Image (spheres, rainbow, N blue to C red):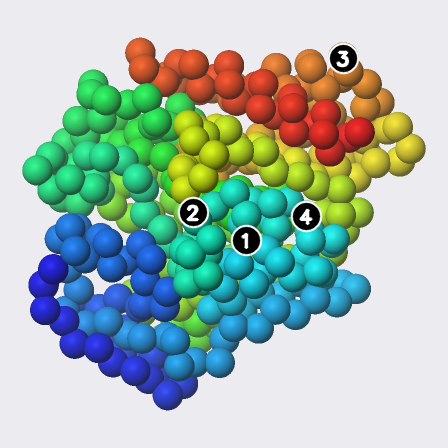
Amino acid sequence: MQAFTLTQPSNIQSAVAAASEPQTKYIAGGTDLLQLAKDDIETPRQLVDLEPLPMSGIHAGPNGLRLEALARMSDVAAHPAVVHGWPVLSQALLASASPQIRNMATVGGNLLQRTRCGYFRDTGFACNKRVPGSGCPAINGENRMHAILGVSDHCIATNPGDMAVAMMVLDAELELIGRNGTRKVAIGDFHRLPADTPHIETILRPGELITGIAIPASAAARRSGYLKVRDRASFEFAVVSAAVALDMDGGTIRSARVAAGGVGTKPWRLPEVEAALTGKPARAATLQEAAGRAGEGAKTTAMNAFKLVLLRRAVLRALQTVAA
């Protein structure tokens, strides 16, 4: 780990000003950044400590949920309003990491966690995410855990998040502040596809900070769930995951929101599944047919082709559970 200075701003504006300096990173829980710094993957010269800032509230009301960026994952997962009004979010958070990490990690930081690709995490290998133009050994290497959707000739690393997948089906909106003021961005627009610039992972501008996440209340949000398939039961990243939110009128699906994790280079919405469900009766044949469309356009490798089959089975299981 390289030496760095630690700045503790007294307010958000001071934090943004400090983070606008070169080679500067924000730090809150630090559960991902510190490990990356120890491995010399991230080499900031200055860290801007967000911990003293009053941004850890969880505000739930009849119209929606607002999470301040420093809210702890464990606190959000256990909040009664989240458990009952947005169960997919609570379930996704509880499926993430370990209890100890959830007690430290913040929701804002969780959205910025970086891929678990072994080639990215090991500086002994080339990696276009670390050194643009150096190559992607995962494409022809050990790629069982890698993406099958949104891949490019420059990167096939998966986005590692659970929470962001749940937020995709909840139509979450991020609140950002930077040198040029504030703006709001839909969660689906926040993470970027790798294309030929895989080192640019989000739409954040230099010094820009996530301050909050707004999630509307809805019938679909209340009838939602998250399924995670992984190699072990705890502290493990998804091989495949599925988030589902259904708005139903009796036995008919009025609208559906379906997303997947573990398969995309970003949290991945599945509009092909949603279209096959909308306006249809929630019968076994309907769910089976819709789930069978998941992952259209996938590009697999020799080691991860199984993910397409597993994705469809996971989506079917999640649909069956939520629709029951």
Amino acid carrying label 1: it is Ala
Q: Earlier in the sequence, mark 4 or mark 3?
A: 4
Residue tagged by mark 3?
285
User: Where is residue 156, by image quadrant?
Assistant: top left
Instruction: Say which of 159 and 188 sits in front.
Output: 159
Residue tagged by mark 4?
87
C-alpha distance separating marks 2 and 3? 35 Å
In the image, which is nearer the foreground, mark 1 or mark 4?
4
In this picture, is 74 found above or below 317?
below
Is 217 situated left or right of 267 in this image?
right
Within 10 Å of disc 3 (Cα), the crowding (few <14, some 14-19, many 20+) is few
- The residue sitting at 54% across, 49% down in the picture is 93
Amino acid carrying label 4: it is Pro
Q: Earlier in the sequence, mark 2 or mark 4?
A: 4
In this picture, is 123 found above or below 307?
below
Label for residue 186?
A: 1
Within 10 Å of disc 4 (Cα), the crowding (few <14, some 14-19, many 20+) is many
- The residue sitting at 16% across, 76% down in the picture is 5
Is 160 situated left or right of 254 in this image?
left
- The residue sitting at 33% across, 84% down in the picture is 9
Is 51 situated left or right of 135 in this image?
right
Q: Pick out the residue farthest to the right.
A: 250
Q: Secondary structure at mark 2?
A: loop
Instruction: Say which of 234 and 307 sits in front.
Output: 234
Residue tagged by mark 2?
97
User: Where is residue 232, by image quadrant?
Assistant: top left
Q: Earlier in the sequence, mark 1 or mark 3?
A: 1
Q: Secondary structure at mark 3?
A: helix
Please identify the quadrant where the C terminus is shown.
top right
